[in-house]
Image: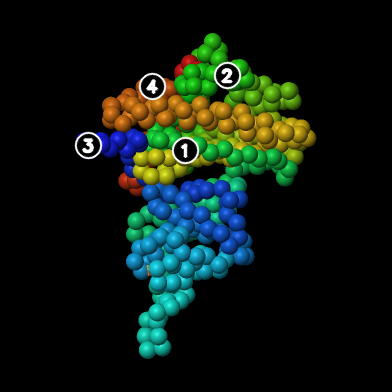
Amino acid sequence: MPLQTLSPIAAGPPAELLFGDWYPALRSGTLARGRTRTALLLGIPLLLGRKNDGTIFAMRDLCPHRGIPLSAGWFDGETVQCKYHGWRFEPCTGQCREIPSLTSADSLDATRIYASSFPCEDRDGYAWVYIPAAGEGRIAKALPPVPELPKFSTKFRSAHLTADLPCNVDHGIIGLMDPAHGPFVHQAWWWRSQASIHEKTKHFEPIPEGFRMAAHAPSKNSAPYKLLGVYGETITTTIDFVLPNRRYETIRAGEGEDAKWFSSLTTVTPVTPSTCRIDVAAAWNIFYSVPFVTSIATFFGARFVRQDQQTMIEQAEGLRHHPSLMLIDDADKPAKWYFALKQARLKGTGEHPLSGPVSLHWRS
Ligand code: FES
Ligand SMILES: [Fe+2]
């Protein structure tokens, strides 16, 4: 019998990754007390869990003794115990608490041994994990703030969506900020149709490690914006992109506690160098009293994200052949800015691709 040909790995080319930042590993609500779960983040295998006191943690899923995954062992709500020789680790610090094979004749101090653990914070329903740059090690330093979904009142509803993408994080991010695919990928009666394509001018300005699409009257051909418009107020929208992977969109009508608002934080997170995952966290106070609004919003949002996901699955087919690609003006300018910002971070130059406000024109 002839040998069967192995099919090539179904992912496109890898991307360079940005370490030294916070990424969402998984939904924090899925971490029960005394239980653990595994995740892959920037190609790093993680063991996440929640201690008896409610604290969540993220360790590298490898025992520092012989490298067996710690997830093969046990967690009693306080310490993670390796399956192989039973070493116990405090999971937030990674500190070894016990080496069962040691006798009173041994001088080895187990507490000087550490498994790798990462800063881990519960925010907006995600377990955010700080992945240090190589060599950053255990040195205590001021970490950047954990990303947060902006909220503009104390009462609000929220929803989450997620989709795995078979492409690298760069393709995921430029797909996310791409303004020209909307009428083609997201055709739907409740959103907009190809026939509604028209010329647009958008104003951008630089912000630290990113850029902002300045406040403006939202697309009049988008049904969700029409819904907000029932309040008859001036609606402002801002869309910020910030390294390494964050898109913040806020839509607001009115001011103060009476203001109506919708806010979302979308992140594209590298799972491996050649695959990524899109996560959307959204919060809003419009239609607060309408029942089922969260499930309705999640249904339509999920359909929207699935359309992007399906398109990127098809794109990955083509990318496997390593084609040369192009970025065109002006619709692809945000993508060019993203690549320039990323290079500036990687090289530490502090350069910014925008020296001031700029207007872009496209049809969508
Ligand atoms: S490999 Fe984990 S304790 Fe030995
Ligand atoms: Fe899209």
The amino acid type found where label 1 is placed reads Asp
Q: Secondary structure at mark 4?
A: loop
The amino acid type found where label 3 is placed reads Met
Q: Viewer-nearest of labels 1 and 3?
A: 3
User: In the rendering, at what x and y percent does residue 280 appear?
Assistant: 55, 38
328 vs 92, nearest the viewer: 92
Q: Which mark is residue 329?
A: 4
Q: Viewer-nearest of labels 4 and 2?
A: 2
Question: Badge 1 local density, few (<14 within 10 Å), some, or many (20+)?
Answer: some
Q: Which mark is residue 164?
A: 1
Q: Image quarter for residue 117?
A: bottom left
User: In the rendering, at what x and y percent does residue 194 appear?
Assistant: 52, 13
The amino acid type found where label 4 is placed reads Asp
Q: Secondary structure at mark 2?
A: loop
Q: Image quarter for residue 335?
A: top left
Residue appearing at x 42%, y 30% in the figure? 313
Q: Viewer-nearest of labels 4 and 1?
A: 1
The amino acid type found where label 2 is placed reads Ala
Give the mark, 4 or 2, whose residue is nearer the N terminus: 2
